[in-house]
Image (spheres, rainbow, N blue to C red):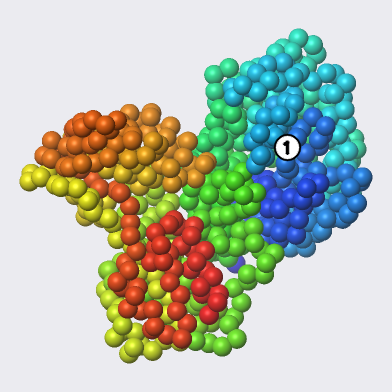
Amino acid sequence: MKRDYPNLCKPIKIGPYTLRNRMCSAPLGATDILADGTPGPRTLGFYEARAKGGASIVTVSELVVHPETDGSQMLRLSLSTPGQLGQFAYVADAIKRHGALASIELSHSGQYAGTYMVDKKAKAELCMYGPSDGTRPDGIPVKALTKEQIADIVAAYANAAALAKRAGFEMCMVHAGHGWLINQFLSPYFNKRTDEYGGSLENRVRFAREILTAVREECGPRFPIELRMSGSELFDGGYDLEEGCRIAAALEDLVDVIQVSAGSYQFGFSITHPSQFRAHGCNVYLAEEIKKHVSVPVATLGGLSDPDQMESIIAEGKADIVVMGRALLADPEIPNKIMANEGESVVKCLRCFVCMAERPVTQTRRCAVNPRIGREFEGHVVAPAAVKKRVLVVGGGIAGLKAAETAALRGHDVTLCEAEGALGGILRTEAALPFKEDMYNLGVTYAHLVEKAGVDVRLNTKVDAAFVDEFAPDALIVAVGSEALSLPVPIEEGARVLSIDDLYLEGAEVGEEVVVVGGGLTGCECGLLMRQKGKASHVVEMREGLAIDANIRQRPILLAELEAAGVDAVLNARALRVTAEGVVVSQDGQERLIPGDTVVCAIGQRSRAEAVDQLRDGAPFVRIIGDARRPANITTAIYEAFHAAMDI
């Protein structure tokens, strides 16, 4: 078979094992963790999905090695907890039985213990340990580890690795990046020790060398060790790439592969986990440089999901292995699709941080584009329906597309009608925003997927009650979406007011100073786009904060982008009227003019209730989904669409 991506599909040797391809699953936090640190049943299904999807290594994350000094709510492994070893063995077996190597990440958070704890009060009460005494940027004190504690932690790494090996894991990853404890020892910013563990590079790598040596001695030469490190800390006072190369060279004799990430948790979350405002593969250059200084295989990661880009990384020798985290949440089947020459079917990660925002809020996993994530154990397999039915889907936005594809995969006869001349719905507007290209491309991908699934797509077809009566479907899914709200204030003659659709879909021109009314996610993105186009930009919001509808991971990143771009935030301000000079608002009991020659309305959406109401009795089975049910977000739309199709 001729491979479209021959370099990605090429095997590679890691220790005694031959990987089936160059695509690996990054350490992803477990889905459900019991109170004693044991992986729950959903965790088994979560990791198994990555193995079934074709990844060559699936890494379970994060196993806390020394709970006495690390209070993080993550996995733990001890013989003193009845049944715990067995649960880890089941997880390892679930990975291995699909041809992937089962790996586990050994971790100590150091002064960032409790990062994923939902109870922030309890987190603040933890005793934080690090290489040196100090105070975290958030005011929490840090206590220096004693030499006795250091020795105990080194032994704990070896013991955890041995137990993992006993449970059936075939290799381990030692987490030495992202500001966690080992990285804190490596970093001149965090490490102010004056003993043999601080000062020179030789001293700062001593802790890492002792850990890696202990793991090797305990587990033997045929148990591969992967080192995860930040190629550069990428903040003032941290180590740079040049020193990152020296660190890698100083540790390579003790490991079988080096995974090169970037940044530090406290100072660069959107660098370590590249946001939509950064280029895909923006951290690959770190691995590329480190690869020149070591002889062991080097892995790279960071916003990678495009098969062509990943193929080029391997082909050009920038890295030996590509690692995907969020990408394999969005589509666990990426490696299988690439191996089968189906790269155009990859559902790419939106980098929206829904997956990472859900963990500290509800302690669950959720993905905007994958409704099964974290729920694999519940058995939501897209299996053939017992009875083939005639299904009509009304609306070609993402909800309609997902419902149509899912129903077709189940063997139903599916017709999708879209009133406009193109599929994608509201996702089509995202083409106008460079940083939302992934969102726009999702609509393009699903247009391909519904065609591949055999859906009968009819564009420029408006559906009403008469159409449905004539069509006579067995099941009707209504996904007609929403429409933009209009400004409910007087608009004086000569004022220029645009909707988001006018701006993004119709290409309406704006002047040199733009006022965006509405400071939710859509309005903030519009305000940022205006600044990127060189316009003066004001965002008017009635509430006391911008982008309140954004998730807790995405929001601070977006706010930082707005501030850096110089977007003027006008908060606690209610629009009163629009004039040719701008928008008059009420703020703090006073009227003031927010100047602008163009006004963009971004105050929200409303369901197309009239269209929905006339279709409610159109079939024995009727389901209203997405914005047609209530304006929400892409995550809700896809979840409702998937389950509507599964219920037919």
Front in this rendered view, residue 162 or 220: 162
Which is nearer the eye, 316 or 176?
176
Q: Quadrant of the N terminus?
A: bottom right
Residue 35 horizontal/vertical position (percent): 78, 48
**At 43% across and 46% down in the image, what residue appears?**
549
- The residue shown at (59%, 29%) is 266
Tell me: 267 left or right of 64.
left
Q: Answer with left or right where residue 213 lies relative to residue 102.
A: right
Judge whether residue 623 can be spotted in this image. yes
x and y percent of residue 89 in the render? 84, 55
**Residue that badge 1 annotates:** 72
Q: Residues within 10 Å of mark 1 (few under 14, many from 20)?
A: many
When the figure is inspected, residue 170 is found, relative to residue 411, above or below; the finding is above
Q: Is residue 589 above or below residue 326?
A: above
Q: Is residue 485 left or right of residue 416?
A: left
Residue that lies at the very extreme toward the front in this rendered image = 589
Which secondary structure lies at badge 1? loop
Residue type, label 1: Ser
Near-viewer residue (359 or 427): 359
Where residue 156 sits, quadrant-wise, is top right
User: Residue most toward the left?
Assistant: 493
Q: Residue at x 29, y 60 (%)?
A: 483
Is 352 situated left or right of 566 in this image?
right
Q: Is residue 297 above or below residue 620?
A: above
- Give the x, y percent position of residue 59: 71, 48
Q: From this viewpoint, is residue 537 visible? A: no
Across and down, in percent, residue 38 comes to 80, 50
Q: How many dots with numbers?
A: 1
The residue at the point 63 percent across, 69 percent down is 380
